[in-house]
Amino acid sequence: MPKLTHLDSTARASMVDVGDKPVTDRIAVAKGEVAMKRETFELVRDGAIKKGDVLTVAQIAGITAAKRTSDLIPLCHPLPLTKVDVDLALDEFLPGVVITATVKTSGKTGVEMEALTAVSVAALTVYDMAKAAEKTMKIQNIRLVEKRGGLSGDVLNE
């Protein structure tokens, strides 16, 4: 059975010591969705949400969240991110918004949590921006789809 890395020998929470790990290029890609009623989708698509440009505000929120992940997730290391890209695409078949975050660094630990946090906060921002039109939107399917670099190897999950 794999060992949980954030527990010490007495099963107490512990930040992983990455001091002896080599610096490598790291990338993580996460995705998620905000499903909504067709009427809400059309308001977002048409720029008719009263709070403003939903996709741009959510994109900026996702980028900011990736940079602040270690402030939100207690055992995450603060990382010097070299790239954060948050893409929000309208999907009329969902209907809703598909969010993809790509995060890069050169460091001793990966950026999976930063990518997942970016998607999560971008999705929450879509909800916040459009909740006056619909309170039944669903934030769903948030997942890591790719990880590259580091000792644990590459992961492709889509």
Image (tube, helix red, strand yellow):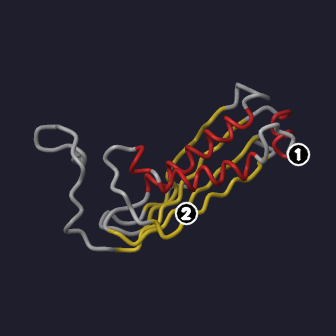
Residue in the foreground of this view, choosing between 99 and 78: 78
Q: Give the structural element (helix, strand or loop) at label 1.
A: loop
- In this rendering, would 46 be left or right of 143? right
Q: Work out whether mark 1 precedes mark 2 in sequence or the reverse, and give the earlier one.
A: 1
Disc 2 residue type? Val
Q: Position of residue 117 (x, y in %)?
A: 50, 48
Q: Which residue is mark 1?
A: 46
Residue in the foreground of this view, choosing between 40 and 60: 60
Residue 86 is drawn in which quadrant? bottom right
Q: Quadrant of the N terminus?
A: top left
Task: Say few, some or many: other residues with alpha carbon within 10 Å of mark 1 (under 14 / 14 to 19 / 20 or more).
Answer: few
Name the residue located 55 percent from the left edge and 62 percent from the top edge: 102
Q: Which residue is mark 2?
A: 84
Disc 1 residue type? Asp
Can you say whether 34 is above or below 108 in the image?
Answer: above
Q: Position of residue 34 (x, y in %)?
A: 67, 40
